[in-house]
Amino acid sequence: MLPVLLSSRHLARNAGMRINSPLNILKRAVRERSRSPFILFQGRSFTRCSLLSQAAKKPTRPGVISAIKGLKLSPHDSKASGWQDIKRLFLLAKPETKSMFFALILIILSSAVSMAVPSVIGKLLDIAKDEHEKPESETETETMIFGLTSTQFYTALGGVFVVGAMANVGRIVILKVTGERLVARLRTRTMKAALEQDATFLDHNRVGDLISRLSSDAGIVSKSVTQNLSDGTRAVIQGFVGFGMMSFISWKLTCVMMLLAPPLGVMALVYGKRIRNLSRQLQTSVGELTKVSEEQLSATKTIQAYGGEKKEIHRYADEVRKVFHVGFKEALTSGAFFGVTGFVGNVALLALLLTGTSMIKTGLMTVGDLSSFMMYAVYTGSSLFGLSSFYSELMKGAGAAARVFELNDRKPLIHPTIGKDPVTLKDKVLQFNHVKFSYPTRPQHHIFQDLNFSIAPGEHVCIVGPSGGGKSTVTSLLLRYYDIDSGEIKLGNDSIKDFNLRKYRRLLGVVQQEPMLFSGTILDNITYAVPKELAEDETRLSRAIGQANCTKFLSNFPDGLQTPVGPRGTQLSGGQKQRIALARAFLLDPSILILDEATSALDSQSEEVVAKSLLQRSVRGKTTISIAHRVSTIQHSSRVLVLNKLGTVAETGPFDELINIPDSNLNKLLSKEQEVEEESPQSKPEEQEQEQEQEQVQEQEHEEVPTPPITT
């Protein structure tokens, strides 16, 4: 059976549906043409797909997912050609053309000085020999060197050496600065590409590997384009000049030298290909090592709590061993290549020396000519080694560049900037209509089968449900971290898929159970991503701080809002971090605010303050969606939406109404929660204990210091 070619335009026209990604195209195609393999192309470019088996009677999403390449960055591709990557390597340096051109002039100048030395030495040797053989009557006459007296010649030679040294210094400085600019630009571009990726991509690729591509890979690429290019250019100049001078001095000896060029060239090509593949394997292994180390360092407390240090050290050692094995192979390959080529070079010099000595005896060469020739031969041989090293480093750069370019080239399935500007979400009804969804990493497990609900403007709806029932998934879908499999999510009359994603998300506010705080001050984190005019409004800032009940603990800090929070907010307790995140949301005052267990670490007093602030939002027509399991949080909502494990809405209504129905789903859910709490030891929440302990310590440390006002 012949494969069927399907285009996005064809499917959209025949299926009467909007195609937003290759995944949706494939799913539709599988449903309609399940008995025929197919190849998908979108626009002018082919989407790489596997031909689906004709035997698949009931195509499922796992088959569709496996057909799409690019969700996960490939670890390595040893057969891929590196020349395209090399071309892109040099295109990276295009903005630095002027600097590179000036560096090239300095390279030529310094190389010219270096290549003049053998000729000068040969001339001096011949002059010294002639002086020794002169009759005593002629020794009183001053010898002229290149038409100059000895004093003039050595003075001029010293000046030339100074110029060469200055050119060398200038070359190194320019290329170093150029390399730093290039790697900064490459890392910025790569980070931009990583931040624009969709959640599906981030689910398949661990942070450690992305960090490796940003750091070590980008550095190797920069070195390959700048320093390595400089060394290669210098080697080419020295090789051509050396070959020319050797031919000028003695073409016979040059022919002897050239007999070694073909085998050395073949060895260099084989070595370069091998070292490129090993380099990419090494960078991949380093990426895996970075993944493990990043995961372990992030979970140090958990590892220590369970006594897992030994296990994690063994796991890390296994990854280190893999890096060592690849590095060992690279060392053996380099050692064998340079050892063999070095031996061949030494044999060649010995052959030249023997041949040259016999030519001196027959009067075909002078001692100075042979000395100059041997030095030029060394320069030429060094240039061949330099070119081999240049080629191997270039291949290393190509291997690293392939990993960096792979991330740069990867286009997100959900484009962040395509679509119309939503302008405002005020007074718009939120609707989930027949939503079906499963996570790409677990396509066989459907979170929602047929989810339907609507939220009116100004409502405070609390979503509850069993563990794994999809409460937090509602947040992910509303923020459009993932696209749904079928159905529609609408705000007013518009599907959220029609919106410019970046502008749409700016109109939403979200506070998570474990809020992420960034290194900086408390003020920096409260005003993070908040428009400048809001961040500079001190009245509004103070109101937001009060709405989140941050005033008390901020007053205990000597620096107030200028207090550093530490990496990921490690200097603050869980409750303090949640209140700072809430203050950020209240300062932004979005039309739709999403609270995902955002008050789980708060004490009753703080939770009551936050509840009053949310009630004020509802009065002003602002929508709030809370995800919670604590009764104290649920009862403050205007409506409760109960999900079940089937991925549908079990019931909805005001809290007071549902709680008074004995067999309601809400009562059953809360009863289970209560049973779990009764079985667990009765103790204070860890976050509350940490917060109280920290505040007590701070009060003791500063008990003699007057309580300072909150400073901005």
Image (tube, helix red, strand yellow):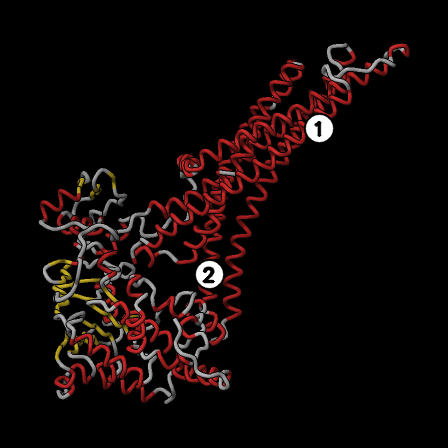
If you read the primary sequence from the N terminus, does the residue marked by circle 1 or circle 2 appear first? Answer: 1
* SS at mark 2 in the image: helix
**Between marks 1 and 2, how big is the CA–CA gap?**
56 Å
Residue 598 drawn above or below residue 358: below
Give the x, y percent position of residue 291: 44, 58
- Under mark 1, the amino acid is Gly
Give the x, y percent position of residue 663: 14, 86
Front residue of 329/176: it is 176
How dense is the environment of label 1, judged by Cα within 10 Å: few (below 14), some, or many (20 and up)? few
Residue with the mark numbered 1:
158
Q: Quadrant of the N terminus?
A: top left
Q: Is residue 356 visible?
A: no
- Under mark 2, the amino acid is Val
Residue with the mark numbered 2:
292
Give the x, y percent position of residue 195: 34, 55
Residue 697 drawn above or below residue 298: below
